[in-house]
Amino acid sequence: MSAPTLTAAAPSGTPEHSAALEERIARDPGAFRILTGDRPTGPLHLGHYFGTLANRVRLQDAGVELFVVIADYQVLTDRDVADRLPEHVLGLLADYLAAGVDPGRATVFVHSAVPALNQLLLPFLSLVTDGELRRNPTVKDEIAHSRQASVSGLMLTYPVHQAADILFCKANLVPVGRDQLPHQEVARTVARRFNERHAPVFPVPDALLSRAPKLLGTDGGKMSKSRGNALALSATEDETARLLRRAKTDAERHIAYDPDRRPEVSNLVLLAALCQGRDPHEVAAEIGDGGAAALKRAVTESVNEFLRPVRERRATYLADPAGLRRVLAEGNARANAVAERTLAEVRDAMGMLYR
Ligand code: ATP
Ligand code: MG
């Protein structure tokens, strides 16, 4: 498939741009191909769900082709050793399927199982400068939270690896959380520069943000698998209640939706609203002067109710690890075939097909 490059007026990653993109997708879903993914560092959480996973499933169901990478090499960006990878990979896949990713239509694959993909890295690395890599704000933030004493080459260059993940299948649409926008810019830059320097091989991919591009965790920072502040899709109802009881709020009794002034309270209101499919202002008005305790009770109930069917499906998928491994094997085979084709085009464009 040769995906068209989009040229919407607003810059990629802005709410206006995402709205314009949504209109184009609704008109012609078959013109889009999604690549997005996650690191197998732990179970998916509500930030993933409302930041990107719900969009993946919705667009898949609307007829957009979906590729999902389980980014296992990327686990090593901020730690020396990747722990419990087999368990995390199957858990991630169970999360996807439980959320509605359809393995009959979508291609879910593991980065390390697609070697041709990694060959794109060398030419792509030649297209970015070390200054561009060092200025990346998300990489800087991740270095600040990293468990490592020094910054590895992998940490600095992983946005370029992500560009390869996206471009190997010529994806033109990337539903992500806000933290990914700087990386998304790297992918766009790499695509443009490759096309200019060698031959027009790649679409320039667009980021698509959801209504919750940065869901906060219980400590008020970005909800993250590796920061101990996340509400996992797979948590039990009791765990969810316990985690939410200690969620950061503020001292004001009246509950309002005001993300700029009251980020933590507004984040909880938003979470309840997303789970209930309602407007956050309406949810806040309902709680009114009930204070943080009433807010937390409402969020706990909404989250648990919303996730009940997802949790049931997840447990069913996890009970059949052989079935999960089959899904991955099929996804890996499909991704390998696509990667081989793109690599041949790239080598041809660079004069490296020695026939
Ligand atoms: P880790 O702590 O291991 O980095 P993470 O929770 O940050 O894990 P990633 O695997 O890095 O998750 O991110 C996968 C995808 O989920 C990305 O598209 C990212 O933007 C999105 N995402 C992650 N956390 C959030 C969040 N809190 N709100 C919205 N989107 C999010
Ligand atoms: Mg992350």
Image (cartoon, grey):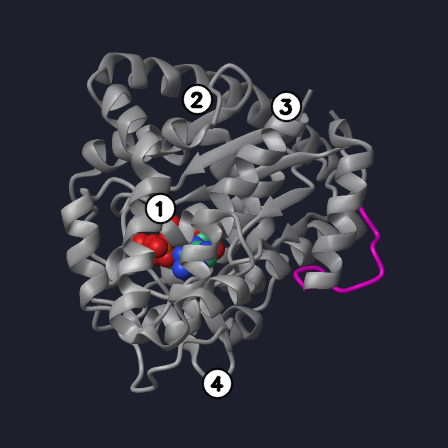
Which numbered disc, 3 or 2, marks the residue closer to the eye? 2
Q: 70 or 9: nearer the eye?
A: 9
Q: Is residue 56 above or below residue 232?
A: above
**How far apart in space, not on screen, are marks 3 and 2 (Cα)?**
14 Å
Which numbered disc, 2 or 4, marks the residue closer to the eye? 4
Q: Specify which label sits upstream in the sequence, 3 or 1.
A: 1
Q: Specify which label sits upstream in the sequence, 3 or 2.
A: 2
> Is residue 333 rendered magenta in the image?
no
Ligand 1 lies under 8 Å from the Cβ of mark 1: yes
Label 1: element kind: loop
Give the residue at mark 3: 341
Give the residue at mark 2: 332
Mark 2, Cα crowd under 10 Å, few <14 / some 14-19 / many 20+, is many
Tag 1: amino acid: Arg
Q: What range is drawn magenta here? A: 6-14
Q: Specify which label sits upstream in the sequence, 2 or 4.
A: 4
Give the residue at mark 1: 39
**How far apart in space, not on screen, are marks 3 and 1 (Cα)?**
25 Å
